[in-house]
Image: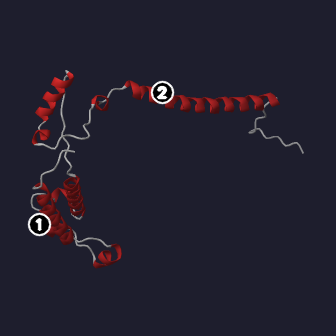
Amino acid sequence: VDVKMPFIKKNGCNVTDTYGILSLLTMIFIAASIYYWIFTQKKRIALYDDAELSSVDYTIEIKNPPQKESSYDPEVWKQWFVSTFDVEVAGITIALNNEHLVQAIIRRRQLICQMQEMMPHIDDFDIDDLESNLVKCEIVPRWKQVVCGAATAESVYLSIMKEDGVIADLSNKSYDVA
């Protein structure tokens, strides 16, 4: 039965195997080009990074500084570098072995952020008066405390006060130059 369907247009093109091979070769060329671009991009990134100068390129780290009072003075180090090596010194940083103090400060900041998250509006948080923030904090349900181990605002406040004590003690210590 030859039914005429005017809405279907018959194409008169004669598709041969050449079109399939040409399409396959095109896909292989595109895939190879992408892999080549990725491979050369890694090399270009390495070359670009080597061409960029940073402070690390001009930094000197003293591993065993003398343990005396002058080791804490950047001006003493600056004069020593200038007189010994005849160089221009842009800046001196003195690092101390105070990792415990830094860790205590980080823990305190994390606790303060935890208390801020308990507030309905972060704008109401007053870092200078932590005790007044207790009444503004949302109440943690008992089930969350038991099941999830969620902290209450009071326990976070007490932890902050404990960290304040640790920080005060560690701040009074004298630290060696790193």
Q: Which mark is residue 61?
A: none
Q: Amino acid at mark 2?
A: Arg
Residue 24 as seen in the image, left or right of residue 80: right
Q: Quadrant of the N terminus?
A: top right
For the C terminus, give its image quadrant. top left
Other-residue count near label 1 (Cα within 10 Å), few / some / many at <14 / 14–19 / ≥20? some
Above or below 88: residue 138: below
Q: Point out the residue furthest to the right here.
A: 1
Q: Which residue is mark 2?
A: 44
- Image coordinates of residue 172 in percent, x first then y, are 9, 56
Q: Is residue 76 left or right of residue 17?
A: left
Residue under the point 29% across and 75% down: 145
Q: Which residue corresponds to mark 1?
A: 131
Nearer-the-camera pick, 123 or 3: 123
The amino acid at mark 1 is Glu
- Residue 108, percent across and down? 20, 59
Taking the spot 45% from the left edge, 26% from the top edge, the residue there is 47
